[in-house]
Amino acid sequence: MEEKVLLDASVVTRCRRRVHLESDRTMRDVPKAPPDPGIEQRISDAADHRRFVADRLGRLLGGAWTQIPTDLDRARREELTLAAMRAGVRYVSAAQLPADPAGGRRGSVDLLVRGQDGYVPVLVVRHKITDPGFGARISPLSSPDPAAARTDDRLKVRSHSRDQLRLAHALRLLRSTGLGSAGSLGGVIGVDAEFVLWHDLATPNWPGGRTALSEYDARFADRLAVATAAATGADALAEPSRITECKGCPWWPTCERQLRENRDVSLVVRGEDAVSLRRIGVSTVDDLARMSPREAEELPLTVTRVNDVVLLARAWLRELPLVRRVRELSVPRADVEVDVDMESYADSGAYMWGCLLSGADVGHEPGYRAFVTWDPLPSDDEARSFAEFWSWFTSVRRAAAERGLTFRAYCYNELAENRWMLASAERFAGKPGVPAVAEVRAFINSGEWVDLFASVRDQFLCPNGKGLKVIAPCAGFAWRDAEASGENSMRWYRDAVGLDGDPPVPSQRDRILTYNEDDVRATWTIRRWMTSPAALDVPFAEDL
């Protein structure tokens, strides 16, 4: 008898081709990419956070709370969860909901709360779930019940579609047991673990007037069809196409091989743009490369610049990592220059600010320095390291101004640095040396703060991406650590501070410092290269 396809909530936010490959029994022994260390780290951190919240709920709720053991097999956990629900236990942690073969669903939920007419699901997540504003419906952890919810006049809901879709999956599973609430509420406990945020999944607040439930139902039906076709050997309903998710997907080697064999258009134009091009018969890089500028102007693109797509295709066919958009490259330069690179650990904080001072003498020793805390985050010592960074940074700016010299600071993709400069100023307001938010904001909005990523984006076509690890080698730079990456640095950080309960590893601290120094030297190398004659060896777009 054919095994029934059962899917968990992850499929509704997952690539359709991955759903196919994971459901195709003939693909089970195909070699896969090694686990992405960054993804593994986030999974581990999320599990730690769920355990922390469960322990806290156990203390707060006492005898009204029970936890399903997580070390049992799925069938036994389903039995215990169903027994607890039938017994009317008020709060059930780590629930494994009974599978729904008719609906093709299976899944777990972090907390079940018994409401007036049945159980409602609650997720525990390791990200922020609210922003300053008005309108969020919350209830305290001491009473994580929708009946205890109130509208908070300081908070608004932060958009996380994945949370709502996961809740919709749990809601459908609960209803299949006959013990779920007839309503459409679901809750989320965020990284701060201070309250439960309640979502009404039947409210039409999605694009086009859709609800989270209707969006979930449509997506799940599609993924179930894809998985069923794969499991039964029917014609595939999903073919590979390169998207952002491919970067950390274990199936990427399989998909990449097929895409390259087919010279698929998504190798240069990703996501929905690639889908749109295939619909009009432009399915390969070669098809795209043959188009004239006039033909390209008619292409149905929403993300990629119309003027870029043909040139990207031609550059890819010639295996060119960079193509100049402009004949003469430029980067804002100054007499005194500082390259800045920040290291953070997930949403816990920024533990290091690395700086490389170069240019005219302003009374500060040139070269690399790092302002760092090795206290495990979150920690108040983060305020000290940030204050020391800002104090040094400001003193360099002031010294340049006093000598009549120009000053600029550089980073590569300012989103992260801006976020943590502003967040640090806000979180540690009033602590010694911590600047006012207005002071930080004035600096990042000034001409003295240069995002080198923007300079690269505006002046180059980059068929292989625009990341620092892609662009710096084109300028002749190489990292000393063969495993250097932002994702790996998070794993090194855990070892460096002993975040897993083991003694701190000093060698991992040295490794992070080397990695951070190389990052700032990479930005220094790129801008010097861009303002040198050597960069003019990069092919010019019009010559393609």
Image (tube, helix red, strand yellow):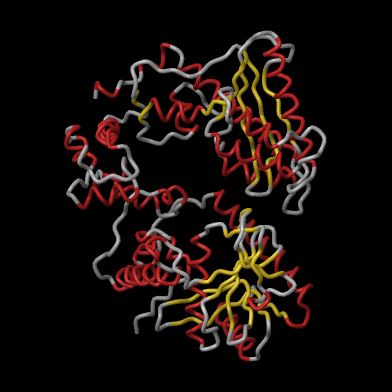
Q: Position of residue 14 (x, y in %)?
A: 42, 60
- When the figure is inspected, residue 38 is found, relative to residue 143, above or below; the finding is above
Q: Position of residue 253 (x, y in %)?
A: 38, 49
- Please tell me in which quadrant of the rendered image residue 441 appears: top right
Q: In percent of the image, x 35 and y 59: which residue is there?
A: 17
Residue 317 in percent (x, y) is at 26, 33
Quarter of the image with the C terminus is top left
Q: Quadrant of the N terminus?
A: bottom left
* 124 shown above or below 306: below
With 22 as the anchor, is 65 left or right in this view?
right
Of residues 224 and 412, the one nearer the viewer is 412
Task: Determine the residue positioned at 36% across, 61% down.
Answer: 16
Q: What is the residue that sits farthest to the right in this orientation?
A: 432
| Circle count | 0
In the image, what residue occupies the spot 22% across and 50% down? 278
Q: Residue 218, percent across and down?
A: 36, 70
- The image quadrant that residue 486 belongs to is top right
Depth order, front residue of 476/404: 404
Comparing 295 with 481, the one in front is: 295
Residue reaching furthest bottom? Answer: 87
Q: Is residue 504 above or below residue 514?
A: below
Residue 460 lies in what quarter of the image?
top left
